[in-house]
Image (tube, rainbow, N blue to C red):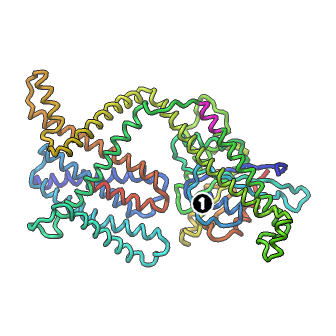
Amino acid sequence: MAALDRVKVLVLGDSGVGKSSLVHLLCHNQVLGNPSWTVGCSVDVRIHDYKEGTPEEKTYYIELWDVGGSVGSATSVKSTRAVFYNSLNGIILVHDLTNKKSSQNLYRWSLEALNRDVAPTGVLVTNGDYDREQFADNQIPLLVIGTKLDQIPETKRNEVLTRTAFLAEDFNAEEINLVSILVTSVFLLYGSDSDFLL
Amino acid sequence: MSFLIDSSIMVTSQVLFFGFGWLFFMRKLFKDYEVRQYVVQVIFSVTFAFSCTMFELIIFEILGVLNSSSRYFHWKLNLCVILLILVFMVPFYIGYFVVSNIRLLHRQKLLFACVLWLTFMYFFWKLGDPFPILSPKHGILSIEQLISRVGVIGVTLMALLSGFGAVNCPYTYMSYFLRNVTDADILALERRLLQTMDMIISKKKRIAVAHRTMFQRGEVHNKPTGFWGMIKSVTTSVAGSENLSLIQQEVDALEELSRQLFLETADLHATKERIEYSKTFQGKYFNFLGYFFSIYCVWKIFMATINIVFDRVGKTDPVTRGIEITVNYLGIQFDVKFWSQHISFILVGIIIVTSIRGLLITLTKFFYAISSSKSSNVIVLLLAQIMVSM
């Protein structure tokens, strides 16, 4: 079992956007019946066959670390959360399509997760705002997922989707828009196969 | 003519307060949420504006600014509007939003909102029964009835909040209560947390692998049925289900442990920050205030108990007594009455300002602690209700 390689992926986003439901769906192919608040971090594991069917097929463990909390938490909570950000292989940023603020907060989430890997220098160069140049050479792949698409009335969907397209572009990330996780798993499995592993 | 001037002054100040309430709502309360129903924001700001206007009118009354008759008129107007909002609109909207959160009752939202509102009115009325409010001079639906009930609720809430603040304030300020936390403690705890997470991961990997092999072998998930099936299951090792449920239980226990460890670590970080804060100048100042407040609160509680037990009514307030004592002790020529009134007035002003500030801060903290994207509207309306009652 330990012979399989492991890949650590962080799932980040504001409270209530659907991270726990997403992780549960990815790992158990089942919908999470009673989602409750995630305290701390909850991990789930999925076995994945990379490049299935080809001679280079390799099986990996994907560990999905679902970190709870909000981006505006007290510094004490942030420093506690920072313990989970070691040796990342990938980040999934989740935002709620019905709540504009959650997509704006994604910038701060990515800063929080990525700054951890930078060796702390004595001088603070940025003021915390998002700077695309800063992450131009970032090697860690990002995936942006928007949830609760079906809760937006039909008429507003287009403008919401264009807005999120800009968001994904800012991160240089791939983008997936999901319906509320109550509905279907087929859409989602497609997403996880269009893979961002090395 | 002077009436017009006074009215324009009042209206300008009201608009100012309205803007302030709006800003507070946007910047602080709803920092992480998108405002979807502007009704909530409007109601909150209006309530805030009118409450502040009431304070303003009190201050004008003491100072003697503006014409007396226009003050009276504005006072009545203010009172009517506030009561209207407090008793009719806010509960109705609270009921409406609560109902719209529950999926089942989606169709007859209005109906259920009205039902909730009627229940609220009933309890509101019942509230006044134990108190001697009803007098034959005033009718049932008069203003005095409503005000007295609102007053009851407001005083109770105020007492609760002040009591809570009185105990919480010294606790947060004083450094006496801080444990000593070193970096080594934090590191050790973090290491334990990561170890627990690793254990959880390895167990989940075993479960996942087991699921996978069972799936590939073509599914032996159902329990063996029948007599022969049961006997077979004793001999052949179905390493599957039993082992899995055991591992699953272990995983659940470990997850609970990880949550506890996370909370403890966060707590340690917070304590460490408080220790650093208390070493700064501001921290020392607050520490001193904390001692002062705790002594004051203990004295107050003591006096209140004695007053209740011995059924004594306090004649003079502490400020006047304090000044009297100082005067008699120091023998300074002091016009007690004149100064005491002004000092009390200043103290009242300070109390009002700090209570508004303290109220807003407490509201914000409370709001962050319990809100989610669904209930945010309801909570803001509840806050508006509390604000007016006080």
Q: Is residue B70 left or right of residue B176?
A: left
SS class, disc 1? loop
Q: Amino acid at mark 1?
A: Gly
Q: Nearer the viewer, residue A117 or B173?
A: B173
Q: How many marks?
A: 1
Magenta residues (range): B183-190
Where is residue A63 shown, x and y percent of the image? 72, 52
Q: Residue furthest right?
A: A55
Relative to B213, say whether B308 is above or below. above
Q: Nearer the viewer, residue A82 or B71?
A: A82
Where is residue B287 shown, x and y percent of the image? 38, 30
Where is residue A192 shown, x and y percent of the image? 73, 60
Relative to B56, say whether B221 is above or below. below
Where is residue A151 shown, x and y percent of the image? 55, 69
Q: Quadrant of residue A187?
A: bottom right
Determine if the magenta segment contains residue A100: no
Q: Residue at x 16, y 62 (%)?
A: B133
Q: Is residue B165 visible?
A: yes
Q: Residue at x 19, y 54 (%)?
A: B8
Query: Which SS type dominates the magenta stretch?
Result: helix
Q: Quadrant of residue B305?
A: top left
Q: Is residue B354 left or right of residue A185?
A: left
Relative to A198, say whether B172 is above or below. above
Q: Nearer the viewer, residue B210 or B8?
A: B210
> Badge 1: few (under 14), some or many (20 or more) residues near its Cα, within 10 Å?
many
Q: Which residue is mark 1?
A: A18
Q: Residue at x 35, y 45 (%)?
A: B164
Q: Is residue A169 visible?
A: no
Identify the image quadrant of the N terminus of chain B.
Answer: bottom left
- Chain ID for label 1? A
Q: Residue at x 15, y 52 (%)?
A: B5
